[in-house]
Image (cartoon, coloured by chain):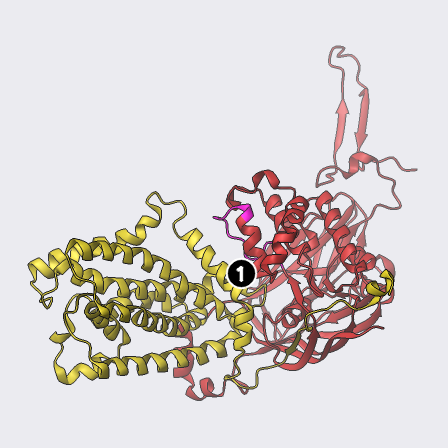
Chain colours: A yellow, B red
Amino acid sequence: MSDSGAVLSPAPIAPVPVAEIAPRRSWLEFDWGEIWRYRELLYFLVWRDLKVRYKQTVVGVGWAILQPFMTMVVFTLFFGKLAKIPSNGIPYPIFYYAGLLPWMYFSNAVTSTTSVMVQNQRVITKVYFPRLILPLASVVSGLVDFAISFIVLIGMLVYYRVEPRVGLLLVPALLLLAVATALGTGLWLSALNAVYRDVRYVIPFLMQFWMFASPVVYPSNLVPARWRWLYDLNPMSGVIDGFRWGITGHGEVNGFYLLISCAAVLVLLLGGLVYFHRMEDIFADVV
Amino acid sequence: MSETVIRASGLSKRYRLGSKVRYRALRDTLTDALRAPARLWNRREGGSKPFFWALRDVSFEVQAGEVLGVVGRNGAGKTTLLKVLSRITRPTGGRAQIRGRVGSLLEVGTGFHPELTGRENIQLSAAILGMPRRELVKRFDAIVDFSGVESFLDTQLKHYSSGMQTRLGFAVAAHLDPDILFIDEVLAVGDLEFQRKCLGKMGEVARDGRTVIFVSHHMNQIRSLCSRCLWLDRGSIREEGDTQTVVAAYESAVLSGEAHVADSKKVQLYQWEITGSQGQEDHRIEQHAPACFRFHAFLPKPIVRGVLGIHLDDELGRVIWHLDWSFTNLEAGPCVFHIRFPYLPLRPGPYMWRGAIFDGGEWAELEGLIPPLIMATQPIAYTQANFHSILDLPFEIEAHSTGQPETSEPSGRSSFPAVERP
C-alpha cells in the first residue's frame, strides 16, 4: 500500500471512554477502576502536600522530627520522671517515642483529612475527579513524615542498645491498620465537615480525648481486664501496643484484642466509604 | 460521518434555596429537626425548603466536531449545565451520555497553589485537569511558550501578577487536548492581546474537529466560534438552532426588556421603562430634560418594612448613583415604583440599572435590569469632549480680561448644553 493508505487507516486508539451522567441509583456503586485511572492525580496531590507543607519554614522538614521528639521529651519528664507512670521496663524515651509515632501520624492525618474537602473547595467545584482521591492523598502524605521520624527511632534504638527483633516485621502491618483507621475516620469527618463546619471545632477535642483513650502516655495493662474489649474497639490501642511490642519486645500483643481492633477498623472504613460516597454527589453544591 | 458524542435527555438539577449559598451549621439541622422531626426524615421527598430548578428537562445532542454555544441570562442555568455535563455535580433527574475524553474549563488556573512555583503549578494543574504525565512532558515547552512567563518559571506563583497567573492557567488548559471541551466564559479575562490569543487558540481547537460546548455572554465570540447555539432561559431550552438565528432572537428579547419573573418565590425587580415614552425610545433619554422612570416589581408576599435599593452603573460597572429608600406596606403581587429626576447629567452612552428590594433587612442580590439605559447620542452631535468623565453637569462659564476694567462685555461666554447644534 502507498503512504496515503497508511494515513487513511484509523490510528490505533484507546477505547473511547463513555461517561454516563445520571442520578445515583445506589450508594454502593463504587468505581474502583476509576480510582486506579486517577492514580497519577493521587501522586501529584501527595507531592503538592509535601511541597507545600514546610514551605517558608526555617526548620523545614525538621519539623517532622522535632514535633514527636519534643513531645517525647515533655512526656518523659512529666509523665515518666514526675508522675512515674509505669513503662513495663522500656526506657521512657523509647516507650513514649514508639507510642507517639503512630499516634502523631494518626492525629495529623485525621486532622488534615478533615479539612481536605473544604480546602480544595475551588477545585471540587470546577473540575471532576473521584473525590476519594483527596482524603486518600491526605492520608498518604502523612506517611512521609512518619518515615522521617521513624529514622530517629532507629537512632534511639541504637543509643539504648535495643536489639532488633523479629517483631519489627509486624510494624508495617500495624502501620497499615493505622492508615486504615485514619482514612476511615477522615472520610466521615471530611464529608461531615463539608456540610457542617462545626466539625473543625470538634477535632482538637476529639483528638485529645482519643489520645487518652489510647495507650500513648500509659501502658495498656493499666486498663482493667474486663474493660479491655471496649478499650480495643479503638484500633489505635492495638496499633500502639503492637508498635511497642514489635520494637522492644516488652509488653504483649494479644491476637484476640488485635482482631477486635481490625473488625472495628473494617466497620469504620466501610461506613466511611459509603457515607463519603453518598456525599460525593453534593460536595460541589454544599462545600 | 457525524457521530453523536453528547446525548442529554431530560437533564434536571434542583437546588434547595439557601443550601447552595451558605453552608449549614449543625445547629441549623438540629433546630430544624427539633422544630419538626418529620421534616428531616422527609427531606428527600419534599421537605420544607423552597426548591429552585437550575435546569429543567434539558435535552439536546452534540455531534462530533461541533462547536455548540450556550447563551442566556445570568442564572439561566448555563454554568449548571456545564457542571452537570462535566460530572462536577450530579443531575437530579434525566441522563446524559458522553463519548470521549472530557476537559472542562470552568475557570482559569484550576488547582493552582500560590506557594508553588510556576513550573510546579503547571504540573499540578495539568494533573488535576486530567492530562497524563507523559503528555505533559511532550507539551511542557509549548505551554510555557504560550503563557509567556518562561523567565518566572521557578518563581512562586504568589509573586505573579494576576495577569500572569491567568496566562499560565489558560496555557495549561489550552493544551489539554481532550476530545470534548467545556468552556465557561474564560475568554473574558486577561488583557486584550491575550484575549485575542485565546480566541485564536479556541478557533484552532474548533477547526481541529474537537467538540466544544462554549458558554459566553459575548455574542460576538459566540457568533465567530459556534456553529449551533442553545438558548437557556430559567433552566430550560428556549430556542435551539443555528447560531445566527438563536443569537438574534436572544438579543432582540434582551433588548425589548422582556419581562423576567424567574421564580415567583423571590422578591424581584424585573422591568423598567421611561414614563410617558412609547415604542423604540423606551430606554433612551435625552440630556438636560426631566426624566421619569418606572420600575416594575413582583412581591410574592406583602411587605411591611421594605427598602428599595437602586444603583445606576456605568459601562465599566462603576456605581454612579444609588438610592436606599425605605417604604412601608405594599400588597403582594405586582407593584410599580416611580422615580423622577429633574434631569440626569450623564455623558452619552449605555448605563445599567441595578435594583433590589429588601424585606425587613433580609439581604437580596442587586440584579441588573435589562436593557441598559441609553443616554442618547442623537440627534445632538456631540464633540469629543462630551465623552470624557462621568457627569455632564450643566454649567455656565465666562472669561473676562481683568486688565481693562472698562470692558463690560465678556470676551468669551458659553452655557449649557455645551454643544454645537448642527
* Image point (62%, 48%), residue name: B168
Residue A190 percent location from the top left of the image: 42, 69
Question: Quarter holding the C terminus of chain B?
Answer: top right
Assign a secondary structure to mark 1. helix
Q: Which residue is mark 1?
A: A122
Question: Quarter holding the N terminus of chain B?
Answer: bottom right
Dominant secondary structure (helix, strand or loop) of the stretch shown in magenta: loop
Pick out the residue farthest to the top.
B404
Residue B39 percent location from the top left of the image: 46, 86
Q: Is residue B414 depicted above or below B87 in this figure?
A: above
Residue B392 percent location from the top left of the image: 74, 40
- Residue B208 inside the magenta-drawn segment: no
- Residue B109 inside the magenta-drawn segment: yes
Q: Nearer the viewer, residue A136 or A156?
A: A156
Decide: few, some or many residues near mark 1? Use Cα within 10 Å; few <14, some 14-19, many ≥20.
Answer: some
Q: Which picture quadrant has residue A270? A: bottom left
Q: The disc labelled 1 sits on which kind of residue?
A: Arg
Q: Is residue B227 visible?
A: no
Subunit that carries the residue with mark 1: A
**Region in magenta:** B107-119
* Image point (38%, 62%), residue name: A112
